[in-house]
Amino acid sequence: MDRELSGRAAHMAEIGRKAEVQMAEMGVDDAFVDRLVETFYGRIVEHPTLGPVFEARLSGRWPEHMAKMKRFWSSIAFKNGAYAGKPVQAHSGIDGLQQELFHQWLTLFAETLRDIAPSPEAGAWFMASAERIARSLMLSLFYNPADDDPALRPKLPAA
Ligand code: HEM
């Protein structure tokens, strides 16, 4: 049992080391993760449609949110286990959260990366991660099996 546990710890440490090397090659470090979160949420607050949705939920709690989001992106990038939360639950019941807002969120994230990513590879890596997570959040929040009903698919005009 002990051997199993220490084997697992060694495996996790190895994953973390590999992630650090991969991030370093792209120019990503802790300072960049902090800057990404600061810059992105600075723009979120200014955004005409995203800003009010965040503000309504996070008013008075922004410092905690920022610290949490730094831990979140740190754990995605460095696989260091810095974040342990429940994103799906956290996004349930946010007033005014619609699928369209996710597209705006991703656009703003892409613009932020374009402006501040330390390398094109880093920008592409963070964008791909955000898209993957956004897709899974959207599925859990908005998926409607009825949308998959073949009878409801739009009919293509005959060629
Ligand atoms: C339109 C899109 C989005 C909106 C409006 C939104 C809004 C929010 C809000 C208001 C919170 C704070 C919840 C609370 O503490 O009460 C939150 C938390 C969080 N969001 Fe989003 N979010 C969006 C998309 C995303 C995406 C695409 C990601 C990941 C790539 C993400 C990751 C997170 C995480 C990790 C948390 C912390 C969850 C926890 O408490 O552990 N969000 N979001």
Image: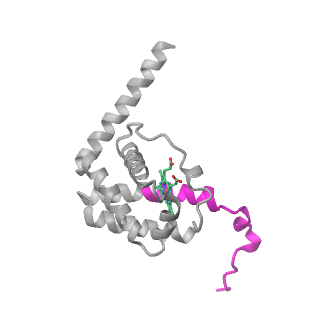
Magenta run includes residue 135: yes
Quarter of the image where one finds residue 125: bottom left
- The residue shown at (69%, 63%) is 144
- Res. 148 visible in picture: yes
Considering depth in this image, is 143 or 11 the residue closer to the camera? 143
- The residue shown at (35%, 30%) is 14
Residue 48 vertical position relative to residue 132 in the rendered view, above or below = below
Left or right: 96, with 78 as reference point: right
Query: In x, y percent, where is residue 114?
Result: 29, 66
- Res. 29 visible in picture: no
Magenta run includes residue 34: no
Q: Residue furthest front?
A: 60
Query: In x, y percent, where is residue 142?
Result: 63, 62
In magenta, the rendered stretch is 130-159
- The residue shown at (29%, 44%) is 22
Left or right: 98, with 153 as reference point: left
Magenta span: chief secondary structure:
helix
Q: Residue furthest right?
A: 151
Residue 158 vertical position relative to residue 4 in the rendered view, above or below = below
